[in-house]
Amino acid sequence: MRMNIHLKNRVACVGAGMTLFRRRLYETSDELMWLAAKQALEDAGLTIKDIDCVVYGTAPDNFDGIHMQSEALADGGGALNKPYTRVYVGGGTGVFSAIAGWWHVASGLCRRVLVIAEEKMSHVQPHPQYVFHHIFDPVTEKPLGVNLIWIFALEMHRYMYKYNIKKEDIALVSVKNKRNALDHPAAQLGMKITVEDVLNSEVLVWPVQRLDISPISDGAVALVFTDEENAKQLTDEPIWIEGVGWNLDTMYWTNRDLAFPTYLYYAGKMAYKMAGIHNPRKEIDFAEVYDPFDYKELHHMEGLQLARKGEAPILTREGVTERDGDLPINPSGGLLGVGNPIAAAGLMKVAEVYWQLKGQAGKRQVKKDVVTGLAQAWGDLMQVGTVIIMRR
Amino acid sequence: MKPENPPGTPYKRNDLEEGRVLYTEDSLELWYRWSLGKYLSKYLEGLKEGRILGRYCKACGRIYVPPREVCQYCFRETDEWVEVGDTGRVNTAVVSYIQADRSRMDKPLIIAVIELEGASKGMGILHRLGEVDPEDVINRKIFGKKVKAVWKPPEERTGSVNDILYFKPVEEV
Amino acid sequence: MTRVALVGIGSTQFRPETPQKNFKELMYEAASRAYIDAGIDPRKELDCIITASEDLWEGVAIFDEYVPDQLGGVLKSVFTVGGDGLHGIIHAYMLIKTGYFDLVAVEAHSKVSEIETLQKIYHFAMDPWYVRPVVDNPYVLAALEMMNMMRLLDITFDMLDMTIMKNHLNAVEWGSPYARIYDYDNLESSEYVAQPLREVDIAPHVDGATVAVLASEEKAKELTDDPIWIEGVGWATQGGRVERTLHNLPTALNTAGNMAYVMAGIENPMAELDFAEVDDRFSFRELVSLAMLRLDGGDLMEMVVNGVYTLDGDFPVNTGGGFLGNGYPLEAGGMMKLLHAVKQLRGEAGFNQLDDPEKALVAIRREVPSNSYAVLVLGR
């Protein structure tokens, strides 16, 4: 990527909406899309007639049990007779669909874009996790009976080994995020727990325990992006999208450094360069980093240069990442607290940055005055980082 | 406070079971016959013979295990076959108590990434560990220790990663 | 704002089976050819790589994982689009238009020969409540669509036969394994798959991979004296409801086409374009595409009967032989069409070469039962 010195189309976020995040929702996938889209459009003061194109995000294809599922769900996104597309980078899709929304506007091709991310995991029987069995290499890994939590546990344990991190410090992330989620109206798992609760919860794959993990969820989130001219007509205070970045590492994950997310470092660098940020730790006021597991919040803070290598657990222990801290991380409650309908969870993070920058987060509003926020997601086979930076 | 009144109608598992939520069912059984290609074929043939093979890239000097057609750094075809050892060091290890569908296992399984000797630094493979006390995994004493492959008897090998039963420690943990 | 050019394209051959290579090796073959064609070092110069795919075609979940290594994309900006390769091209176009990206590669492929249960995948693509219990075969949906389109656009079997013969003839030069010299008697004896759809109306499946490299104006001028410019793009969906879309003309194709025409400043497509590569997954689709893209000169039948769409005609269509002649490579379908168009515009189409063509249209619809369209206008 190079710098664009002739920037023509600034992109603004002017509306956001979301459904509840729950283990099981009665609405079908396209109904969830519609509910989220309706709220986002109302928030922006627009109708579907004003929308030029629709971007849809969902992580794997198979949760809905429909092949080419994006095609089947087009109606739920109001995409009839409109340019409509689905992009995916696995778990990173939520933030990535917002990035795709950005380039639809930044390219000058579209003026008003509806970005929808939706995931309905409750369809899958007996357990949604089985879908992930098929993300592994069918020759070198699947015959070993591999499951999804193994690889995260392997990464978490390597991270703990390399920087000598205690499980207690990692558990603090889960405690913080679930507590933050108590103030989120859509949250699935807002609760008051202690470090002991995490350490005493069921061991799934050591070192990963039940309360280290985000839940399985249904839900949808939608955002409305417009160009500068439209944004200024619609609102006095648009939130600008100032930087985007994404990066994918090799699929041979056993050949990678598991203690540090190099791909995220590059994705962050790309977004910082675009946003003109030289010192992320000072210039990013708060961040929504991807936290499907508690250690991932720490891992990602380090990848994003919001903490030095091995420093994120210390910042967490010192309360720096609390809502009233110097660098609030996941004030929404994150995936651990609000829930994890995969792609929708990523876009929920972008929505949270929007609400925080607007000062509309109510009880969740971080204490310090915020101008610049960052949302990030992660996915595929622990190999992709997606980053978006927004400013007031 | 945003989001305001997020919509959605939650229900519980027993709402399904007791007929308060209606549903239809469908299942899908798919079969694929993936070509292995030149490189993976040779890798599996090697395993059948009790050898672990890698590919060497002359341009950057890396040795890849599992073997690859393309060097990820140089974007050129790798050059030579290299037999790496069946010993290595534990990069990371975990104790699994659940299976792929999240049901509990009868007996916990130890899974590791093993950096093979003879391959480039950081080139690990995923496999099981055996003859290891789970406690030594939990306290991370096993990390960095030397392990060696325990092979199936030659007549039972099929040309699969499972031709290696597991890796076992060959130095004191 | 920068213009966007196609500076390189590379492809494997399209074959019914490719057992000697796995999908990664197939992708690598196409990618290395495209990068040589563009004269670039992908590791140093590429800003972004896009793959077009869908998980069940591949038999894995989250196919995006599997792509970076063999495309030179490790630790680069890579993503996957759930669409045809042309949708990928459109994303690449937009990325370059933002001004932040100089060089973007797009890949699409098919390994359809490795799917043993293809019919089940098609069944699984249908609506689970209304359609699946009734229809288990994609060709039944295609036949319903064919029935309606023939009625709405006055398409006759003679017109279809001429289209089939033309495309097969055009495909001979491409060394297609399917290309046949048909006469009317051959066609008449073709069996019905689902009346009115005959076997000869259906393009058979093939394996293959194609990669294209797109560049900003500045970069394109560095790389080549003779780039192919992407002058207009358009895409749209007709929605997910088969029961609605089978019975109506595909207005979304019209929407997508008009979007591309406006962008390219084209008012009278048939006069301003030199040829077109349009969807012919089924024979009738070629004629429907031409009608919806305003390439029917007001009277589709007259055009077909007078041979306007043949290589020697005034407005050649599917000069490379299309899917009917070469086979249908799933999401790489649009890329095959793009390849044929680029070869024509570059003057590399051999026996099929038209006389100095300057502007072309490429249009695609995704596989049944989808209703997504993508359109490109290319110029020299």
Image (cartoon, rainbow, N blue to C red):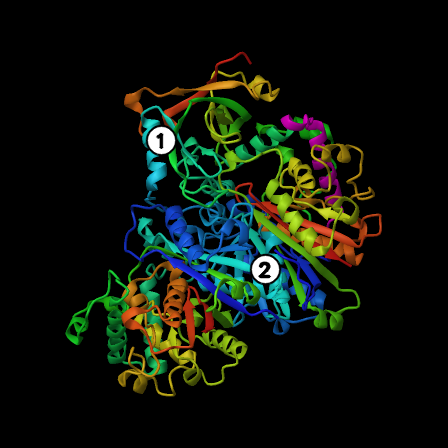
Crowd tier of the residue under label 1, counting other residues whose Cα lies within 10 Å: few below 14, some 14–19, many 20 or above: some
- Measured as percent of width and height from the top left, residue C33 is found at 40, 55
Reading the image, the residue beneath label 1 is B160
* Residue C302 within the magenta-colored segment of the rendering: no
Residue C101 image label: 2
- Provide the secondary structure element on which disc 1 rests: loop
Residue bounds of the magenta highlight? A161-185
- Measured as percent of width and height from the top left, residue A249 is found at 54, 43
Q: Is residue C126 visible?
A: no
Find residue C322 and report its image quarter. Answer: bottom left
On screen, B37 above or below C183? Answer: above
- Measured as percent of width and height from the top left, residue C72 is found at 48, 48
Q: Is residue C324 visible?
A: yes
- Say whether residue B4 is left or right of residue B20: right
Type of the residue with mark 2 = Phe
Find residue A54 and report its image quarter. Answer: bottom right
Type of the residue with mark 1 = Ser
- Say whether residue C26 is left or right of residue A245: left
Crowd tier of the residue under label 2, counting other residues whose Cα lies within 10 Å: few below 14, some 14–19, many 20 or above: many
Question: In which quadrant is the N terminus of chain A drawn?
Answer: bottom right
